[in-house]
Image: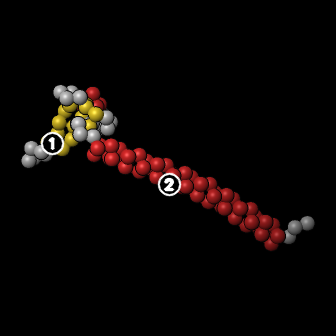
Amino acid sequence: MFNKTEISEQNNQHEQLKIREKIEIVLRKLQTLKNESSELISQCQELKKLRSEHKGKVCSKCGYAIESGHEITFRDSAGTQTCYYHKECFEQLLIS
């Protein structure tokens, strides 16, 4: 038969094992999130590169080129054009 200290030690070991398993799960989730965020950063950099190479107007919401006459233009207080939107993308922004 087990005495109280042996039972207590077994319980402590069991609790420590549970805690380790939880920590390992959290660390795996964290690594997955880090990988996903790295991928998103990479995609954003690619999009910025494409936008800077593109000579036409690019929608600030979806990132695709805008045909002339189908854009909504935003200007700052000095009148400088700051960004463009497709009419449909701008309408979606107003709705949301």
Q: Which residue is at the front of the view, 62 or 10?
A: 62
| Picture coordinates of residue 33, whole percent (x, y) | 51, 51
Query: In the shown orientation, is residue 22 left or right of residue 47?
Result: right
Asked if one can make out residue 6 in the rendered structure from this viewpoint, the answer is yes
Q: Residue at x 18, y 27 (%)?
A: 69
Q: Quadrant of residue 91?
A: top left
The residue indicated by pointer 2 is: 34
Q: Residue at x 87, y 67 (%)?
A: 2
User: What's under tag 2, amino acid-wise?
Assistant: Lys
**Quadrant showing the C terminus:** top left
Q: Residues within 10 Å of mark 2 (few under 14, many from 20)?
A: few
**CA separation, marks 2 and 1?**
36 Å
User: What's under tag 1, amino acid-wise?
Assistant: Gln
Q: Residues within 10 Å of mark 1 (few under 14, many from 20)?
A: few
Give the mark, 2 or 1, whose residue is nearer the N terminus. 2
The residue indicated by pointer 1 is: 81
Tell me the SS state at disc 2: helix
Query: Is 8 above or below relative to 88?
Result: below
